[in-house]
Image: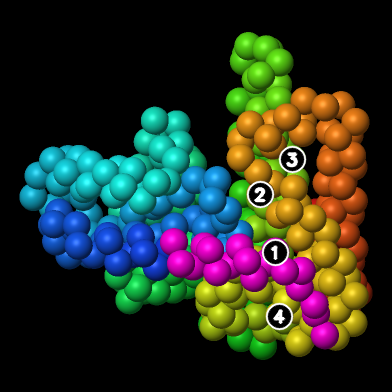
Amino acid sequence: MIELAPVYNKRAIYSQTRLDELGKRIITIPKISDYNHLTIFSAGSYARYEASEFSDIDIFLVCKQEREDLPKPHTSELRLFAELIKLADIMGFPEFSNDCEYLKILYSPQILKNMGSAIDDYENYFTMRMLLLLESRCLFDNDLYDEITKEIIKSYFIDYPDHEQTFQPVFLLNDICRFWKTLLMNYEHKRIGSVDTEIKKTKQKVRNYKLKFSRMTTCFATIAAICSYKIPVTQDKVIEQTRLTPRQRLESIPTRVPEAEEAVQEVLDRYSHFLDKTGLNTQDLENCFSDKAKRTEMFQDAAEYGSSMYRLLQVLDSCQTENFKFLRYLVI
């Protein structure tokens, strides 16, 4: 039986309480009525139920209509964004990242239409799609949120009718791996050409540390959970996993693959140490990375955590039938 460190329950209660309050306040926004087909969801630490009092809030907006079908879409967007910024200030959240760069409305018809294209990356559709599936919690219009989620998952199952007994979600697994690689590339891009002051170097190390834990877990806990099912893997099974947090996905694995319980326990134990260490304000956390000895220790923990996740994937792969050794598809 999986045992969880107290930090998991503490963070979950805090995250859920804040998200519930935010959702109730969003409903009261007057300009929300300008959109009849809009859903809003949170991603990041709050959606993973891992937030602390120092965590920022990531919000994404998805509309099922085409933008050109809306009256005065730009004006409506600006009014809605102003209300959301004001609401975040009232609730004491840190400012939206990068000067509100990601506070925009994306339109699901375009997201579905452009899957795999150059536009998919350019317009941020890919990132939104992955965050929706991998770490999201609905804040407004849960029915529409579920509907859009199911439509996106369906797009990964276009070949299912021809392979109902043997279907393997390779398209989806590859996209999750692509998202992980994209996160790594984005991190490296932000370092290129930056001014290498000690303050900037420290901030980069903090981002790197979090990448090696939270972002990696978001991707590979989902891969592990999906690959713990026997084939065929159906849409309903994937939908079931999207409704869980990454931690809950890990917890669910031994119910399908009992042999993986020890490996799952190790992953969760190591991740709880990450939550303990990152539950600090920005200055205190950065101070940890300014100290060489502490920094070395924390990055060693991150390396060992990555190894524990890989061992879990190896256990799951060894328990699969010969016709679906999923690690092979993650590499080639």
Name which quarter of the figure residue 9 lies in. Answer: bottom right
Q: Residue at x 69, y 46 (%)?
A: 278
Please tell me how crowded label 2 is: few (under 14), some (14-19), or many (20+) other residues with Cα within 10 Å: some
Q: What's the residue type where badge 1 is placed?
A: Val
Secondary structure at numbered mark 2? loop
Please tell me how crowded label 3 is: few (under 14), some (14-19), or many (20+) other residues with Cα within 10 Å: many
Q: Residue at x 84, y 41 (%)?
A: 298
Q: Mark number for residue 252?
A: 4
> Image quadrant for the N terminus?
bottom right
What residue span does the magenta drawing correspond to? 1-18
In this rendering, the count of numbered labels is 4
Q: What's the residue type where badge 3 is placed?
A: Tyr
First reached walking from the N terminus: tag 2 or tag 1: 1
> Image quadrant for the C terminus?
bottom right
Q: Residue at x 90, y 75 (%)?
A: 262
Secondary structure at numbered mark 4? helix
Disc 2 marks which residue? 279
116 is higher (above) or lower (below) than 263: above
143 is higher (above) or lower (below) than 175: below
**Alpha-carbon distance for marks 4 and 1?**
19 Å
Q: Which of label 3 and label 2 is nearer to you?
A: 2
The percent coordinates of residue 166 (x first, y second) are 69, 82
Q: Which of label 4 and label 2 is nearer to you?
A: 2
Disc 1 marks which residue? 7
Q: Mark number for residue 192?
A: none
Report whether 105 appears left or right of 196: left
Q: Mark number for residue 209?
A: 3
Q: What's the residue type where badge 2 is placed?
A: Gly
47 is higher (above) or lower (below) than 182: below
